[in-house]
Image (spheres, rainbow, N blue to C red):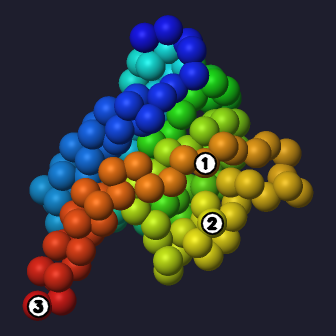
């Protein structure tokens, strides 16, 4: 893939990788959220899935782990030109990490009406008072992302 702008098809394909990560979170009993950071050329630089239960780390969200891994691959904290793809709208912590990493695009699946920070509860990603702004692509493979979460919580509550 060239460094040309990503298409809806690219977003959907990358979301498949994030959905696979979400499935991995289920293996440790964590909330099924997955994320990938993709470089401008379409190369996957980092993947992550929720690991809070596995590690006991409250910051072990899928996005944080994918961002950390991508920065390690790049050898720098600035992830300019990259795209963060995540199955659920990022929370304030994850949206803030994305802004601080200078990620210019975030693609997400399901909306998070309780804690979302890309337009639901807050809009950290497009906050004009910050030093970096993000292009947001919501609702990519939304039904699949939301179904994973609904099934997980239905089982937990039964």
Q: Which residue corresponds to the image point at 13% horizontal and 56% vertical from the top-left?
A: 27
* Residue position for label 3: 158
Label 2 element class: loop
Looking at marks 1 and 3 on the same chain, the residue that comes earlier in the sequence is marked by: 1
Looking at marks 2 and 1 on the same chain, the residue that comes earlier in the sequence is marked by: 2
Spatial CA span between label 2 and label 1:
9 Å
Label 3 element class: loop
The quarter of the displayed image where residue 153 is located: bottom left
The quarter of the displayed image where residue 10 is located: top left
Q: Which residue corresponds to the image point at 58% horizontal and 72% vertical from the top-left?
A: 120
> Could you classify mark 2 by the number of other residues whose Cα lies within 10 Å: few (under 14), some (14-19), or many (20 or more)?
some
Spatial CA span between label 3 and label 2:
31 Å
For residue 33, above or below residue 131: below
- Whether residue 151 appears in this view of the structure is yes
* Residue position for label 1: 136
* Residue position for label 2: 119
Measuring from the top left, give residue 16's x and y in whole percent. 27, 40
> Could you classify mark 1 by the number of other residues whose Cα lies within 10 Å: few (under 14), some (14-19), or many (20 or more)?
some
Q: Which residue corresponds to the image point at 54% horizontal and 69% vertical from the top-left?
A: 116
Measuring from the top left, give residue 83's x and y in whole percent. 54, 34
Q: Nearer the viewer, mark 1 or mark 3?
A: 1
């Amino acid at each position: 893939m060239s460094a040309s702008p990503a298409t809806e098809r690219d977003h959907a394909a990358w979301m498949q990788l994030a959905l696979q990560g979400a499935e991995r979170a289920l293996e440790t009993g964590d909330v099924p959220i997955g994320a990938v950071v993709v470089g401008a050329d379409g190369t996957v630089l980092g993947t992550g899935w929720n690991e809070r239960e596995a590690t006991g780390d409250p910051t072990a969200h899928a996005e944080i782990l994918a961002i950390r891994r991508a920065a390690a691959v790049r050898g720098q904290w600035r992830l300019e030109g990259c795209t963060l793809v995540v199955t659920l709208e990022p929370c304030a912590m994850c949206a803030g990490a994305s802004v601080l990493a200078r990620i210019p695009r975030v693609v997400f699946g399901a909306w998070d009406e309780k804690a979302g920070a890309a337009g639901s509860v807050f809009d950290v990603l497009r906050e004009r008072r910050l030093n970096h702004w993000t292009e947001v692509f919501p609702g990519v493979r939304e039904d699949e992302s939301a179904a994973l979460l609904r099934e997980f919580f239905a089982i937990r509550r039964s």
